[in-house]
Amino acid sequence: MLNTPSNIQKKVFERPKTIQENYDYPFCAGCGHGVVLRLVAEVIDELGVQGKTIAVASVGCSISMEKFYDLDIVGSSHGRAPCVATGVKRAKPDRVVFTYQGDGDAATIGMNETIHTACRGENITTICINNTNFGMTGGQASATSILGQKTTTTKQGRDPKKNGYPVHIAEMVALCDGAVYVERTGIYNPQSILKTKAAIKKGFQNQLNGLGFSFIEVLCACPTGWKLSPVDSLSYIQNEISKVHKIGVLKDVTTDTALQNTRQVKV
């Protein structure tokens, strides 16, 4: 497709097939979930796997994707999405299975499940939306909240003496032998959005190739929880959060052909 103005406009405004034709947009103004969910839908469409994809949602704002996607979607208890996804993938190994979780889910309440899933090398893809708070339940501090961040449970700012230091979930996953690809991205400008889509697509492709566990963490805006405007929230990601949770590829063994051969899943 040539990048003519009309084709670019069609690409931007055309609804991906994976997104339901009629839906009520469930997110707050400026929330990053809508952007990432669209990126996931575009990737599913481009890979041609809509009919064989199963999404696993957990408790939090991410549960709203059941209103968003035309997919088979399984709900799970708070933090347990990787466990449910493990069961789904082992029962139906020919399906593309991904979890879509917040940081309160994947890095706080469900950190144990995230780490053990990575250690087992389950052939699934996890997308962790990190907005450094519990967005759905009132903006409480999560494990990933940065030092000095004001939340409803750290009203004076996160103090390491009282509240400890931030958890770096992507770095922890990268240490697990079963994880083949770990990247942290952000969505705060067009370039970062494109990089996020590329990371998500690679995570799905790794699964299609039977390589093992892929983990993509996305730094996203939560204007409501942060008490910032949507525009200021994007600056907050770029200038504050990304200095603590550093953007980049933390692990990628998928380029090693010999290792790929040893990790191929036999179905």
Image (cartoon, grey):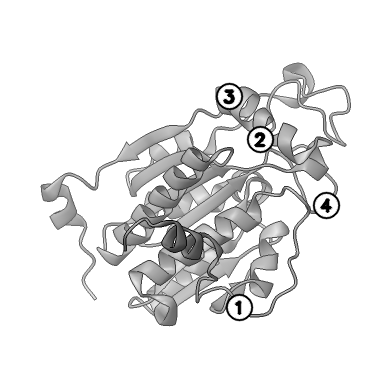
> Which quadrant would the N terminus be assigned to in this image?
bottom left
Q: Which mark is residue 200?
A: none
- What percent of the width, then of the height, locates residue 19? 57, 73
Tell me which numbered mark, 1 or 2, is placed earlier along the sequence.
1
Question: The disc labelled 2 sits on which kind of residue?
Answer: Leu
Tell me which numbered mark, 2 or 3, is placed earlier along the sequence.
2
The residue that mark 4 highlights is 137
Question: The disc labelled 4 sits on which kind of residue?
Answer: Thr
- What percent of the width, then of the height, locates residue 112? 56, 48
* Residue drawn at point x = 68 percent, y = 65 percent: 63
Tell me which numbered mark, 1 or 4, is placed earlier along the sequence.
1
Tell me which numbered mark, 1 or 3, is placed earlier along the sequence.
1
In three-dimensional space, the C-alpha distance between marks 2 and 4, rounded to whole angstroms, equals: 22 Å
Tags 1 and 4 touching, CB below 8 Å? no
Residue 258 vs residue 68, the one in the foreground:
68
The furthest residue to the front: 5
Q: Count all numbered tags in the image, as a single digit.
A: 4
The residue that mark 1 highlights is 20
Tags 3 and 4 touching, CB below 8 Å? no
The quadrant where residue 69 appears: bottom right
The residue that mark 2 highlights is 234
The quadrant where residue 236 appears: top right
Tags 2 and 4 touching, CB below 8 Å? no
